């Protein structure tokens, strides 16, 4: 069984098992280079040392995104997190091969690499305000402000924003129903401020599309690339140099919720996480100085001393 044929079957199995399209695309992007390097090999012929050599080649790369149609090639090697992701994908693939074909697992003695400690990935509050102020006073500006506020006020994923339909927007109750990762439908809530911004957009919105957010030129539902183009345009207009992408608003929502005294369990529910550990590991990420500020504000010692005078 040639590796490319087995890989195609693996992706088919991922689809049949109900994995989200984004997860399948993640496996495809990480495993395709490996399959290209070993395209003439039978899976039984691939040994642990072959995979180790491949991992070492990843570690020694001097460029990123070679031959990638969606991104230009860039100088610089892969990050530790990227290499760890490649190794995780290889483990998942070979574990499946063992179950499917009853073969020896060449990854059995290759350890999973730990991800480096995550760094904050949120758009900063000051940058958000600058983006908001960079929107125009025309109908496009009203749409752009509605996008910014909905992302920042709900913490929803980009898929939830793009798929949000008029019929799923319950303005009077300050909530909406979104479909996100793994086609899961959940409710998100927002403040009265976002209600006003949404109403301003809906008043001027002209489109027969079912979705709330549409292109100003075609009236068609916005795409992922369309939202990213909007953010890039606002970023350049506002002179923002920090992180600005759809997911950075989700991280900002989580960080600011906790900074304002919200609890982790409620935050997990608001983000649509089934496990609090996911929220803690990927979204409750703060710098040392931020942690020091937290401690200064919420220190048990401060509370005891001030409480007793």
Image (cartoon, rainbow, N blue to C red):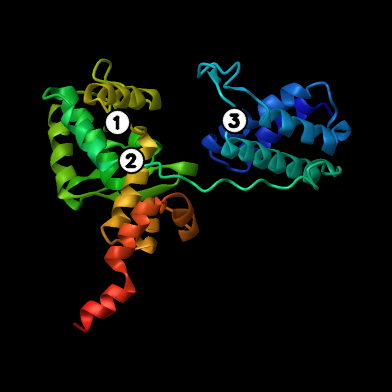
* Element under disc 1: loop
Q: Residue at x 37, y 57 (%)?
A: 291
Mark 3 Cα within 10 Å, few/some/many (few <14, many 20+)?
some
Please state which of the two labelled residues, at mark 2 or mark 3, is closer to the viewer: 3
Residue carrying label 2: 249
Q: Position of residue 196 (x, y in %)?
A: 13, 41
Q: Earlier in the sequence, mark 2 or mark 3?
A: 3
Whether residue 168 is visible here, answered yes or no, is no
Q: Report whether 48 appears left or right of 147.
A: right
Q: Position of residue 60 (x, y in %)?
A: 68, 28
* Element under disc 2: helix
- Between the C-alphas of marks 1 and 2, the distance is 24 Å
Q: Report whether 22 appears left or right of 189.
A: right
Residue carrying label 3: 78
Please state which of the two labelled residues, at mark 1 or mark 3, is closer to the viewer: 3
Q: Earlier in the sequence, mark 1 or mark 3?
A: 3
Q: Report whether 105 appears left or right of 128.
A: right
Q: Relative to 126, is 173 above or below?
A: below
Location of residue 18 (image quadrant): top right
State the mark number for residue 9.
none
Residue carrying label 1: 210
Q: Toward the viewer: 26 or 248?
A: 248
Q: Residue at x 23, y 22 (%)?
A: 237
Q: Quadrant of the C terminus?
A: bottom left
Q: Residue at x 28, y 62 (%)?
A: 261
Query: How many marks are shown on the rendered structure?
Result: 3
Q: Relative to 1, is 94 above or below?
A: below
* Element under disc 3: loop
Q: Report whether 284 appears left or right of 168.
A: right
Q: Relative to 293, is 14 above or below?
A: above
């Amino acid at each position: 069984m040639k590796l490319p044929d087995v890989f195609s079957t693996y992706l088919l199995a991922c689809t049949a098992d109900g994995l989200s399209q984004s997860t399948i695309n993640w496996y495809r992007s990480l495993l395709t280079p490996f399959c290209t390097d070993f395209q003439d090999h039978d899976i039984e012929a691939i040994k642990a040392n072959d995979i180790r050599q491949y991992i070492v080649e990843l570690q020694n790369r001097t460029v990123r995104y070679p031959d990638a149609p969606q991104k230009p090639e860039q100088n610089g090697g892969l990050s530790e997190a990227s290499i760890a992701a490649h190794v995780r994908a290889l483990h998942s693939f070979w574990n499946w091969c063992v179950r499917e074909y009853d073969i020896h697992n060449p990854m059995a003695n290759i350890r999973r690499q730990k991800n480096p400690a995550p760094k904050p990935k949120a758009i900063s509050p000051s940058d958000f305000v600058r983006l908001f102020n960079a929107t125009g006073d025309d109908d496009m500006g009203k749409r752009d402000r509605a996008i910014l506020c909905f992302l920042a006020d709900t913490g929803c994923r980009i898929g939830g924003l793009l798929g949000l339909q008029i019929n799923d927007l319950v303005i009077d109750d300050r909530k909406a129903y979104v479909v996100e990762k793994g086609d899961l439908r959940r409710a998100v809530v927002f403040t009265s401020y976002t209600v006003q911004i949404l109403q301003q957009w809906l008043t001027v919105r002209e489109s027969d599309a079912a979705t709330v957010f549409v292109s100003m030129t075609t009236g068609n539902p916005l795409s992922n690339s369309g939202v990213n183009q909007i953010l890039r345009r606002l970023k350049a207009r506002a002179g923002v140099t920090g992180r600005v992408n759809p997911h950075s608003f989700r991280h900002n929502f989580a960080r600011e919720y906790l900074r304002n005294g919200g609890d982790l369990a409620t935050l997990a529910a608001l983000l649509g996480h089934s496990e609090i550990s996911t929220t803690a590991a990927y979204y409750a990420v703060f710098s040392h100085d931020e942690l020091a500020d937290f401690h200064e504000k919420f220190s048990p010692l401060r509370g005891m001393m001030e409480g007793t005078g």
